[in-house]
Image: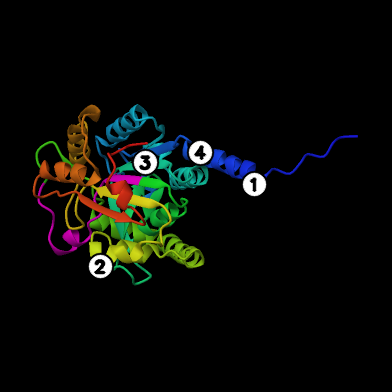
Amino acid sequence: MAQKSKPAKPHQAAEAAKANKATADSRQAKALSLHIGLNSVGAAAYGGWDGPLAACEFDANDMAALAKSQGMKPTLLLTRQATRARVLGALRSAAAALKAGDLFFLSYSGHGGQVPDTNGDEPDHQDETWCLYDGQLIDDELYLALSRFGAGVRVLVLSDSCHSGSVTRDLPPPPPPPGQRARLMPDSVGRRVYALHRAFYDGLQAEVAAAASRAWVDPDTALAQVGAAAQASALVGRFKPAVVLISGCQDNQTSMDGDHNGAFTEQLLKVWAHGSFSGDYRSFHARIRAGMPATQSPNLFALGPAAALLGQRPFTV
């Protein structure tokens, strides 16, 4: 007859708990990354416009190489591979796989666009988008996907694209320097795309609003407060992960494409200097911004409990 095991004594239970905590504390952080680069979009989804660019795939490959050098496991989605389903699927998979202390690094290089804001929460009445191959990814969708990451997960987003509707509505952007193209879907194209696919994009916003209310997350409010530190502080606690985003330009500016890298990505890699940079995210952003022309000033903002992340060296796993 098998003997019953004796219950652990109080001091043994305490020692076991301490050992388990030490094991959990010593768990090596896991890091995943997703890098999206589109040198064109599918004309069928954009009213006949294919939006040719030159350097976006280079940007994505360079960011993937940087991520790998820092111990991350990168995924690349280039041009035709960068569909809405694949991007959203990759975000869901990463959110399910990562735990407190882990890192997710997301980079996007391509055109930025806009669709009318049907919720009325955007100050400029426009929702910004990433132009994926078979359709736009609305900012609401992106922020809802980011909110799905668990508490304690660190999320870094680098976006080398235009998210600037006001400049195209008020005054045309200045002509780009020789050899560069603007990473902005033309306003006329954006209007045509929305007219052709209005039910789809309006439906996406309605779906996100419903999901956000169930999850106690308000993506439109998050985006409306981007860049304003006093207002963004009101969002702390709504996002369980710590999210830091550095974008290629301000909302009223245009990100430039180049021959090998976008202007923002090129300066970022220069400041990073193959890993010799030793400051935190704030100084990293400041150094990148200092090296950019006045017409393109990268933006930095954070969501959730991101103070500790902002104080870390960039790309630290």
Mark 1 to mark 3: distance in Å?
A: 44 Å
Mark 2 to mark 1: distance in Å?
A: 62 Å
Left or right: residue 223 versus residue 266 is right
- Marks 2 and 1: which is nearer the front? 1
Q: Which of marks 2 and 1 is nearer the N terminus?
A: 1
Badge 3: residue crowd in 10 Å (few <14, some 14–19, many ≥20): many
Per the image, the residue denoted by label 1 is 10
SS for callout 1: helix
Q: Position of residue 172 (x, y in %)?
A: 13, 57
Residue under the image location 40 percent in, 50 percent down: 135
Residue under the image location 27 percent in, 60 percent down: 226
Mark 1 to mark 4: distance in Å?
A: 18 Å
- Marks 3 and 4: which is nearer the front? 4
Quadrant of the snapshot with the N terminus: top right
Q: Position of residue 35 (x, y in %)?
A: 36, 38
- The numbered mark at residue 105 is 3
Left or right: residue 124 versus residue 1 is left
Residue under the image location 55 percent in, 38 percent down: 19
- Amino acid type, label 1: Pro
Per the image, the residue denoted by label 2 is 124
Q: Position of residue 294 (x, y in %)?
A: 8, 49
Callouts 2 and 4 close, C-beta under 8 Å: no
Badge 1: residue crowd in 10 Å (few <14, some 14–19, many ≥20): few
Magenta part of the protein: which range? Answer: 156-175
